[in-house]
Image (cartoon, rainbow, N blue to C red):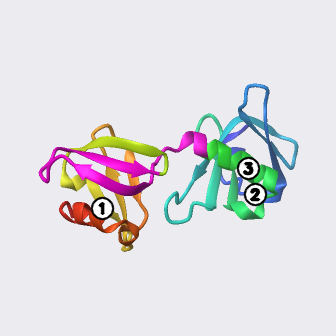
Amino acid sequence: MSESQRVGDRLPPRQFELSLDAFGKLVLVLADGRRVEGVMPVRSYPIQAPEHGIGIVDADGHEVAWIPALPDLPSDQQQLIRDALRAREFMPVIEAIDSVTSFSTPCTWHVRTDRGHTQFVLRGEEDIRRLGGGSGLLITDSHGIQFYVRDQAALDRDSRKLLDRFL
Protein backbone atom coordinates (compact mmCIF):
# COMPACT_ATOMS: atom_id res chain seq x y z
CA MET A 1 0.00 0.00 0.00
CA SER A 2 1.47 3.35 -0.98
CA GLU A 3 1.83 6.26 1.42
CA SER A 4 -0.80 8.26 -0.48
CA GLN A 5 -3.29 5.40 -0.11
CA ARG A 6 -2.69 5.17 3.64
CA VAL A 7 -2.72 8.80 4.71
CA GLY A 8 -6.01 10.59 4.32
CA ASP A 9 -8.10 7.52 3.43
CA ARG A 10 -11.05 8.73 5.50
CA LEU A 11 -13.87 6.50 4.45
CA PRO A 12 -17.54 6.47 5.38
CA PRO A 13 -18.08 3.56 7.80
CA ARG A 14 -19.96 1.32 5.37
CA GLN A 15 -17.19 1.34 2.79
CA PHE A 16 -15.20 -1.36 4.53
CA GLU A 17 -15.65 -4.67 6.31
CA LEU A 18 -13.81 -5.92 9.37
CA SER A 19 -13.27 -9.56 10.24
CA LEU A 20 -10.96 -11.73 12.30
CA ASP A 21 -8.35 -13.95 10.69
CA ALA A 22 -7.44 -17.45 11.93
CA PHE A 23 -5.07 -15.91 14.50
CA GLY A 24 -7.67 -13.54 15.96
CA LYS A 25 -6.18 -10.44 14.29
CA LEU A 26 -8.43 -7.82 12.70
CA VAL A 27 -8.50 -7.68 8.92
CA LEU A 28 -9.87 -4.66 7.05
CA VAL A 29 -11.24 -5.10 3.53
CA LEU A 30 -11.79 -1.77 1.79
CA ALA A 31 -14.52 -1.12 -0.78
CA ASP A 32 -11.98 -1.31 -3.61
CA GLY A 33 -10.94 -4.82 -2.50
CA ARG A 34 -7.70 -3.87 -0.77
CA ARG A 35 -7.06 -6.10 2.24
CA VAL A 36 -5.12 -4.77 5.23
CA GLU A 37 -4.20 -7.34 7.87
CA GLY A 38 -3.39 -6.72 11.51
CA VAL A 39 -5.29 -3.44 11.83
CA MET A 40 -6.12 -1.84 15.15
CA PRO A 41 -8.83 0.65 16.19
CA VAL A 42 -7.63 3.75 18.06
CA ARG A 43 -9.91 6.23 19.81
CA SER A 44 -9.28 9.90 19.11
CA TYR A 45 -11.08 11.04 22.27
CA PRO A 46 -11.14 8.04 24.66
CA ILE A 47 -12.65 9.93 27.59
CA GLN A 48 -14.69 12.80 26.14
CA ALA A 49 -16.17 10.95 23.12
CA PRO A 50 -15.33 7.24 23.23
CA GLU A 51 -17.93 6.32 20.59
CA HIS A 52 -16.83 8.93 18.04
CA GLY A 53 -13.70 9.54 16.01
CA ILE A 54 -12.14 6.09 15.79
CA GLY A 55 -9.24 5.56 13.43
CA ILE A 56 -8.31 2.17 12.03
CA VAL A 57 -4.52 1.95 11.76
CA ASP A 58 -2.29 -0.62 10.09
CA ALA A 59 0.63 -2.42 11.72
CA ASP A 60 2.88 0.59 10.99
CA GLY A 61 0.48 2.99 12.73
CA HIS A 62 -0.80 4.60 9.53
CA GLU A 63 -4.50 5.39 9.39
CA VAL A 64 -6.29 3.33 6.74
CA ALA A 65 -9.92 4.10 7.64
CA TRP A 66 -11.93 6.49 9.79
CA ILE A 67 -15.13 5.90 11.74
CA PRO A 68 -16.90 9.16 12.61
CA ALA A 69 -19.43 7.43 14.90
CA LEU A 70 -19.26 3.82 16.09
CA PRO A 71 -23.07 3.49 16.48
CA ASP A 72 -23.42 4.08 12.72
CA LEU A 73 -21.76 0.72 11.98
CA PRO A 74 -23.59 -2.61 11.77
CA SER A 75 -23.74 -4.30 15.18
CA ASP A 76 -21.31 -7.10 14.28
CA GLN A 77 -18.70 -4.55 13.15
CA GLN A 78 -19.28 -2.49 16.32
CA GLN A 79 -18.69 -5.57 18.45
CA LEU A 80 -15.40 -6.42 16.69
CA ILE A 81 -14.15 -2.88 17.27
CA ARG A 82 -15.31 -2.75 20.91
CA ASP A 83 -13.64 -6.10 21.62
CA ALA A 84 -10.38 -4.92 20.05
CA LEU A 85 -10.48 -1.66 22.00
CA ARG A 86 -11.25 -3.45 25.27
CA ALA A 87 -8.25 -5.75 24.76
CA ARG A 88 -5.98 -2.80 23.96
CA GLU A 89 -7.09 -0.22 26.51
CA PHE A 90 -6.74 -0.54 30.25
CA MET A 91 -8.08 2.31 32.34
CA PRO A 92 -9.92 1.10 35.44
CA VAL A 93 -12.70 3.38 36.68
CA ILE A 94 -12.52 4.14 40.40
CA GLU A 95 -15.92 3.60 42.01
CA ALA A 96 -14.84 4.10 45.64
CA ILE A 97 -11.73 4.87 47.67
CA ASP A 98 -11.63 2.53 50.65
CA SER A 99 -8.51 3.92 52.33
CA VAL A 100 -5.16 5.67 51.89
CA THR A 101 -2.12 4.90 54.02
CA SER A 102 -1.13 8.54 54.48
CA PHE A 103 -2.15 12.04 53.46
CA SER A 104 1.39 12.77 52.35
CA THR A 105 2.88 11.23 49.24
CA PRO A 106 3.96 8.66 48.33
CA CYS A 107 1.05 6.69 49.77
CA THR A 108 -0.89 3.55 48.97
CA TRP A 109 -4.52 3.81 47.92
CA HIS A 110 -6.96 0.93 48.35
CA VAL A 111 -9.78 1.38 45.83
CA ARG A 112 -12.74 -0.39 44.26
CA THR A 113 -12.82 -0.16 40.46
CA ASP A 114 -15.07 -1.44 37.72
CA ARG A 115 -12.55 -4.30 37.46
CA GLY A 116 -12.44 -5.19 41.16
CA HIS A 117 -10.53 -4.21 44.29
CA THR A 118 -6.92 -3.08 43.93
CA GLN A 119 -4.26 -0.92 45.48
CA PHE A 120 -1.73 1.41 43.96
CA VAL A 121 0.95 3.86 45.02
CA LEU A 122 0.39 7.55 44.35
CA ARG A 123 3.82 9.19 44.01
CA GLY A 124 2.69 12.79 44.24
CA GLU A 125 -0.33 15.05 44.08
CA GLU A 126 0.74 16.11 40.58
CA ASP A 127 -0.25 12.59 39.45
CA ILE A 128 -3.92 13.56 39.93
CA ARG A 129 -5.13 15.57 36.93
CA ARG A 130 -8.49 17.26 36.38
CA LEU A 131 -10.09 16.57 33.02
CA GLY A 132 -11.43 19.40 30.89
CA GLY A 133 -13.37 21.55 33.29
CA GLY A 134 -15.70 18.77 34.42
CA SER A 135 -15.49 16.73 37.57
CA GLY A 136 -13.52 13.88 36.01
CA LEU A 137 -10.03 12.97 37.20
CA LEU A 138 -7.16 10.91 35.87
CA ILE A 139 -4.93 9.39 38.56
CA THR A 140 -1.62 7.85 37.51
CA ASP A 141 0.01 5.31 39.81
CA SER A 142 3.74 4.69 40.31
CA HIS A 143 3.73 2.14 37.44
CA GLY A 144 2.09 4.52 34.95
CA ILE A 145 -1.34 2.87 35.09
CA GLN A 146 -4.09 5.43 34.76
CA PHE A 147 -7.22 5.24 36.89
CA TYR A 148 -10.27 7.24 35.89
CA VAL A 149 -12.75 8.97 38.19
CA ARG A 150 -15.75 9.81 35.97
CA ASP A 151 -17.42 12.18 38.40
CA GLN A 152 -16.10 13.14 41.83
CA ALA A 153 -19.59 14.07 42.99
CA ALA A 154 -20.85 10.56 42.20
CA LEU A 155 -18.41 9.01 44.69
CA ASP A 156 -19.66 8.18 48.18
CA ARG A 157 -19.09 10.74 50.93
CA ASP A 158 -16.09 8.96 52.49
CA SER A 159 -14.36 8.59 49.12
CA ARG A 160 -14.90 12.29 48.36
CA LYS A 161 -13.41 13.27 51.74
CA LEU A 162 -10.30 11.17 51.11
CA LEU A 163 -9.92 12.53 47.59
CA ASP A 164 -10.36 16.14 48.74
CA ARG A 165 -7.22 15.80 50.90
CA PHE A 166 -5.17 15.44 47.69
CA LEU A 167 -6.82 18.07 45.50
Q: Position of residue 36 (x, y in %)?
A: 75, 37
Q: Where is residue 147 in the image (x, y as percent from the top left)?
A: 39, 51
Choose mark 1 or mark 3, whichever is in front: 1
* Secondary structure beneath label 1: helix
**Quadrant into which the C terminus falls:** bottom left
- The amino acid at mark 1 is Ser
Residue designated by label 3: 79
Above or below residue 48? Residue 92 is above
Q: How many angstroms separate mark 1 from mark 3 (CA)?
A: 34 Å
Is residue 88 toward the left or the right of residue 29 in the image? left
Residue designated by label 1: 159
The residue segment tinted magenta is 86-113
Q: How many angstroms separate mark 1 from mark 2 (CA)?
A: 45 Å
Earlier-in-chain disc, 1 versus 3: 3
Above or below residue 36? Residue 91 is below
Q: Residue at x 30, y 44 (%)?
A: 141
| In the image, farthest residue toward the top | 23
Q: Residue at x 66, y 42 (%)?
A: 3
Q: Where is residue 106 in the image (x, y as percent from the top left)?
A: 16, 44
- The amino acid at mark 3 is Gln
Residue designated by label 2: 11
Earlier-in-chain disc, 3 versus 2: 2
* Secondary structure beneath label 2: loop
Rendering quarter of residue 34? top right
